[in-house]
Image: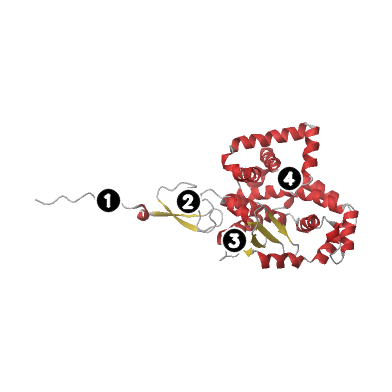
Amino acid sequence: MARKKPDQPDAPESIVKALSVRCRYCGQKNAVKAGYKNGDAVCGKCKLPLSNEPHKKFADLNKHDYIHPADSKALAALRAIPGIDTALKKLLAVTGESAIRVSFMASAIKVTPKQCPDLYAKLQIACTTLGVDMPDMFIQQNPMVNAFTGGVERPVIVLHSALIERLTDEETLAVIAHEVGHIHAEHVLYLTAARLMEALANLSVARLIPGSEIIKFIVSAGISSALLAWSRRAELSCDRAALLVTQDPHVIGRTMMKLGGGTLASKVDYEQFLEQAREFQVNYDENKLDKFWADIINAGLSHPFPVWRVSEILSWVDSGQYAGLMAKE
């Protein structure tokens, strides 16, 4: 009598027939297992969630399609100051734009296709989506969750190490896209000057710099305060640019929740956070005293409040302007 063969074990998952999914963001082809659903896996190149949903690339995006009205208004006021462009270009000539690049080349990690390749891929995604030439990007050791863009002729993007450690890959893409937005929106001359004026707020230090007369002129002419006021409003435009890249308002919302809640963000209810943002916007629009104090307190910061930024993104989405841009051929 023939011996009964033991039941054959199921084939291990590793040899289940694989399927192929092309990353909607970077175009990389990825093998996935049978039964795969959107979001079940991440791209091996950019580390963003795989999905068969389309990702729009803007062939000829006009910055005026997404610039925030407060940005436009503050920039118009800034440009109305006689001689401002000449003064700012002289300021950067004196302080040396090359100093920015040299500083980060010497003290930070440059992102390349071989150094932090997933971050490089995210930068490529942001640039190809918005239609911007690739700038250099660096990672700087810093416990502050922040990022910034500097330079004029050859702008650079700098990400703080704490930001990369704290945020998810989608949220990191949102931050990179925000910084690329500054380049696309042609903010870099004014933005670099604004950051420099923050650093030179102590005039006793500024006097030590060759050509300090131009710094004193900028301060005395009211350019400095107008510049810093504009820079905060410019951030609202670049949040919109970030949304055009991530194409998910909740990625922007969760990013701001982490900026507002820090390490406690994992314990925060996201829907309640959105409700808070809507309540803030209503109070700002309808209560003159709330508006006064919000503007006064925010005046000392480099960026608008995170809750404020979320409320502005929600308002832009609710207005239909974002959907209109996404539907545009």
Q: Which residue is mark 3?
A: 120
Considering every residue shown, the one lying at the far top of the view is 286
Q: Residue at x 58, y 37 (%)?
A: 269
The 10 Å Cα crowd at callout 3, few under 14, some 14 to 19, many 20 or more, is many
Q: Residue at x 72, y 36 (%)?
A: 281
Q: Are marks 1 and 4 in contact (CB under 8 Å)?
A: no
What amino acid type should be assigned to the residue bearing mark 2?
A: Ala
What amino acid type should be assigned to the residue bearing mark 3?
A: Tyr
Q: CA distance from mark 4 to mark 2?
A: 34 Å
Q: CA distance from mark 1 to mark 4?
A: 59 Å
What amino acid type should be assigned to the residue bearing mark 1?
A: Pro
Q: Which residue is mark 4?
A: 304
The 10 Å Cα crowd at callout 4, few under 14, some 14 to 19, many 20 or more, is many
Q: Residue at x 83, y 56 (%)?
A: 202
Disc 1 element: loop
Q: CA distance from mark 1 to mark 2?
A: 26 Å
Label 3 or label 1, whichever comes before in sequence order = 1
Q: Is residue 183 above or below residue 312?
A: below
Q: Are marks 3 and 1 in contact (CB under 8 Å)?
A: no
Label 4 or label 2, whichever comes before in sequence order = 2
Which is in the foreground here, disc 4 or disc 2?
Answer: 4
The 10 Å Cα crowd at callout 1, few under 14, some 14 to 19, many 20 or more, is few
Which of the labelled discs sits on residue 41, or is there none? 2
Q: Which residue is mark 1?
A: 9
Label 1 or label 2, whichever comes before in sequence order = 1
The x and y percentages for residue 325 are 66, 46
Disc 2 element: loop
Considering every residue shown, the one lying at the far front of the view is 204
Label 2 or label 3, whichever comes before in sequence order = 2
Left or right of residue 175: residue 298:
right
Q: CA distance from mark 2 to mark 3?
A: 20 Å
Q: Are marks 2 and 3 in contact (CB under 8 Å)?
A: no
